[in-house]
């Protein structure tokens, strides 16, 4: 991998990680469209450490408060009813599904799941799901002629059951094209949570999974065509760009709809199917060399 490739892929990772459009799919597609080798699951997981570092900094006050309350709750039963302490436990609970499935499906994640036809399918299907979830949220928030405005749930209403459902949604993102934020935000909206609450828990829930995945894949860095230098460079670029994107996205979702992302996902999936169907792109483009 050249330094130019690592710069572009780091830029793509930073731009797409927090948007509900799938960063892993865009890394895969960028390489396929450019005629580069597939950067691979290890490269993707390691560069995500950069974007998750942006999350740690952006939500540092929330994370510090949650960690403090959680550690105190270990030895103080009274603290276990504290909202922040509960959030600590719920992030752990929600991280279980992706941890188990990530290890179980490792071979599929690094192989069959990177087929461009599967990516096109997940882009479209999850785009439709996000659109439905967004529309339901809008109906509650706006009300209507025969409907009263309905208050949506906040993170104070989060339960163990909801945490596990969030976790299962996050685990779906092991398939490129699903999108970690897209799946968890869709799940949250369908369970009745507000856009801001769904996005905030989505980002907090991703921290253990992404950092653990990146640490696990470190052993594979530098193998094949992807060397350590470009990987680290791409991770730094992903961090810088990711921080700017997350700040913008958290402001965007408070007043805007997810429909632009829904339309983009569906159109990209259709274009991908057409290109593969016409033979312009191989469904396994770059895989053999990557």
Image: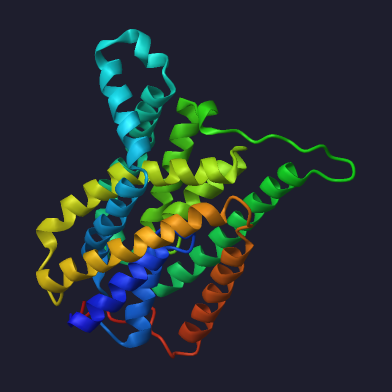
Question: Which residue is drawn at the image coordinates 56% and 33% (left, top)?
Answer: 154
Q: Is residue 227 visible?
A: no
Q: Residue at x 26, y 58 (%)?
A: 50
How many numbered circles are shown? 0
Horizontal and vertical percent for residue 31?
A: 32, 79
Q: Quadrant of residue 25?
A: bottom left
Most extreme residue toward the right, as rendered?
145
Residue 78 placed where, x, y %? 36, 9
Q: Nearer the viewer, residue 73 or 61?
A: 61
Q: Out of 98 and 18, give the one closest to the viewer.
A: 18
Q: In the visual, does 153 lie left or right of 6?
A: right
Residue 110: give x, y in percent of width and height.
26, 63
Residue 252 in sight:
yes
Asked if residue 215 lies left or right of residue 239, the reply is left
Look at the picture and state if 72 lies above or below 222: above
The N terminus: image quadrant: bottom left
Specify whether 142 is left or right of 116: right
Position of residue 285 measured from the top left corner of the image (x, y, whole percent): 33, 81
Eyeballing the image, is 115 above or below 211? below
Q: Which quarter shows the C terminus?
A: bottom left
């Amino acid at each position: 991998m050249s330094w130019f490739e690592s710069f572009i892929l780091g830029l793509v990772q930073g731009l797409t990680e927090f948007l509900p459009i799938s960063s892993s799919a865009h890394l895969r597609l960028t390489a396929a469209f450019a005629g580069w080798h597939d950067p691979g699951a290890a490269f993707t997981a390691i560069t995500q450490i950069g974007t998750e570092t942006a999350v740690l900094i952006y939500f540092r006050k929330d994370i510090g408060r949650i960690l403090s309350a959680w550690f105190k709750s270990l030895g103080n039963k009274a603290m276990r009813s504290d909202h922040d302490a509960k959030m600590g436990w719920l992030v752990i609970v929600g991280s279980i599904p992706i941890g188990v499935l990530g290890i179980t499906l490792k071979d599929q994640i690094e192989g069959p799941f990177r087929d461009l036809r599967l990516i096109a399918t997940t882009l479209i299907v999850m785009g439709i799901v996000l659109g439905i979830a967004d529309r339901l949220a809008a109906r509650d928030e706006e009300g209507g002629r025969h409907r009263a405005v309905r208050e949506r749930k906040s993170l104070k209403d989060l339960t163990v059951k909801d945490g596990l459902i969030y976790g299962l949604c996050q685990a779906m993102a092991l398939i490129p094209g699903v999108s970690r934020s897209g799946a968890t935000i869709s799940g949250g909206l369908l369970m009745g949570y507000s856009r801001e609450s769904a996005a905030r828990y989505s980002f907090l829930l991703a921290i253990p999974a992404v950092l653990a995945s990146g640490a696990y894949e470190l052993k594979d860095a530098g193998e094949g065509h992807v060397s350590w230098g470009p990987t680290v460079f791409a991770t730094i670029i992903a961090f810088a760009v990711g921080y700017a994107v997350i700040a913008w996205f958290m402001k965007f979702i408070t007043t805007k709809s997810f429909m632009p992302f829904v339309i983009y996902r569906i159109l990209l999936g259709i274009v991908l199917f057409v290109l593969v169907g016409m033979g312009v792109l191989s469904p396994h483009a770059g895989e053999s060399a990557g």
